[in-house]
Amino acid sequence: MLPNDLRRYLFEIWRVLKPGGTFLSTFFLLESASPKETFRREQFNFNYQREGFRTASIESPEGAVGYEMEYIHDLYHQSRFENALMMNEFQDTLVARKPWKS
């Protein structure tokens, strides 16, 4: 998902999620030094730098998008979500919660 779509997606989740509700989302985070990150970079080759993200394809940039963790953190903060848990699997998974009082 490209940055503008991601921003709209998070704000729409905020709008429809009940206070205290949780959701999860997956990303390719680029600064992880884990062996899984090395595997991802070898598999997807995020070779193309675009504004705010890296992609594996110029022709179809939304096919595999990698973000810096700082960008994702800032986006969640702007969306007013509370980060609950980050899990590193094939894709980095973020479980976030809408606060009870916003």
Image: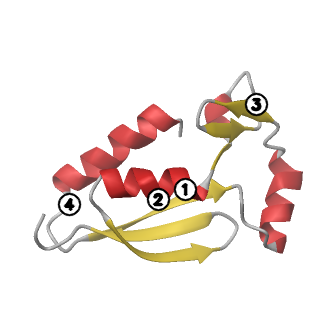
Instruction: Please tell me which residue lies in front, 23 or 52.
Output: 52
Residue 101: horizontal and vertical position, in percent?
Answer: 10, 70
> How was the colour assigned to the protein in this rendering?
secondary structure
Which residue is at 79% across, 73% downward?
34
**Drawn side of residue 29 relative to residue 9, left or right:** right
Crowdedness near tag 1: few (<14), some (14–19) or many (≥20) residues, C-alpha within 10 Å: few
Residue 5: horizontal and vertical position, in percent?
Answer: 43, 35
Q: Which secondary structure lies at badge 1?
A: helix
Residue annotated with mark 4: 17
Q: Is residue 48 above or below residue 94?
A: above
Crowdedness near tag 2: few (<14), some (14–19) or many (≥20) residues, C-alpha within 10 Å: some
CB-based contact (under 8 Å), mark 1 and mark 2: yes
Q: Which secondary structure lies at badge 3?
A: loop
Residue annotated with mark 3: 57
Residue 43: horizontal and vertical position, in percent?
Answer: 85, 52
Direction right: furthest residue: 42
Direction top: furthest residue: 59
Task: Please state which amino acid type lies under the numbered disc 3.
Answer: Ser
Q: Nearer the viewer, mark 1 or mark 4?
A: 1
Instruction: Please tell me which residue lies in front, 2 or 63.
Output: 2
Q: Which image quadrant: the C terminus? A: bottom left
Q: Which secondary structure lies at badge 2?
A: helix
CB-based contact (under 8 Å), mark 3 and mark 4: no
Q: Quarter-wise, where is residue 26 in the image?
A: bottom right
Residue annotated with mark 1: 70
